[in-house]
Amino acid sequence: MIQDGIADAKTENSIVKPYVMSHGTMECYSLKESRRFYEEFLGLECVRHAKPSMVVRCGLKFHIVAVEVGDALKPVNLLNHWGIDVISKQEVDAAYENALNFKDKYQISQITKPWISTACTRSTSRIWITTGGRSSTTPASRTKTCSTLATDSRWMTQRRW
C-alpha cells in the first residue's frame, strides 16, 4: 500500500533529471458523464482546465488528464488502465457490489469478479470496472474508461476466491 506517495527520484545516471512524474492521459467519450463516474463512484477530484479536458486525481501530485474525443475513442483493455488502491480486500468486495448495484446509473459495461493478482512480489486483490457502451473486447466499443480497484494489504498465494 502506498503510504505517502513520495519517493526520491533515482536520476543520477539518466540524461534527463526529472523530479516527479506529473501526469498521464486518457481518452473519454464524454467529460460530463466521465466526471460524474469519477467523482460520485470513484471519489476522485476532477478539475476542468480546458474545453476538451479535465484533470483527475486522488490526493497525490500526479494526475491524469482526461481528454474528450467523442466517437474517436479507442477501446481499452486490462493492459491499458489506471489503478486505484483501497485499504482492504473488504473494500474491493464492496466496490464490486456497488459496481453491480450502480452499473446502469454510471453506464458500467464490464465488471470482473474480485481476483488475486500475483503480478508483483506482493499479491493484490483486484476488480476491473469498464464504463460506457459495450465491452472493450467488442470491436465497435465506446468504452469511456477502465479502472482497476486494488488493495495490497494482504499476502495471498491463491489466485482466486
Image (tube, rainbow, N blue to C red):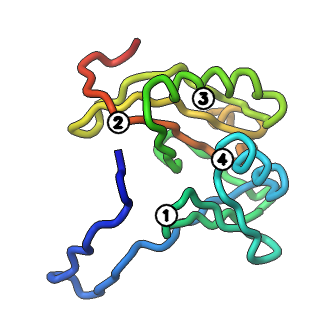
Which is nearer the N-term, disc 1 or disc 3? 1
The residues tagged by marks 4 and 3 sit, at their Cα atoms, a distance apart of: 12 Å
Percent of width and height locating residue 15: 24, 87
Q: Amino acid at mark 1?
A: Leu
The residue nearer to you, when weighing 74 against 60, is 60
Q: Amino acid at mark 4?
A: Gly
**Which residue is found at the position 53% from the left and 60% from the top?**
59
User: Would residue 61 be found to the left or right of residue 13 on screen?
Assistant: right
What residue is disc 4 on?
43
What residue is disc 1 on?
60
Percent of width and height locating residue 26: 62, 60
The residues tagged by marks 3 and 2 sit, at their Cα atoms, a distance apart of: 15 Å
The residues tagged by marks 4 and 2 sit, at their Cα atoms, a distance apart of: 19 Å
Where 97 falls versus 10 (above or below)? above
Where 5 falls versus 49 (above or below)? above
Percent of width and height locating residue 123: 29, 31
The quarter of the picture where residue 128 lies is top right
What residue is disc 3 on?
95
Which is nearer the N-term, disc 3 or disc 2? 3
What residue is disc 2 on?
152
Q: Amino acid at mark 2?
A: Asp
The residues tagged by marks 1 and 2 sit, at their Cα atoms, a distance apart of: 18 Å
Where 67 falls versus 87 (above or below)? below
**Which residue is found at the position 53% from the left and 22% from the top?**
93
**Which residue is found at the position 50% from the left and 39% from the top?**
78
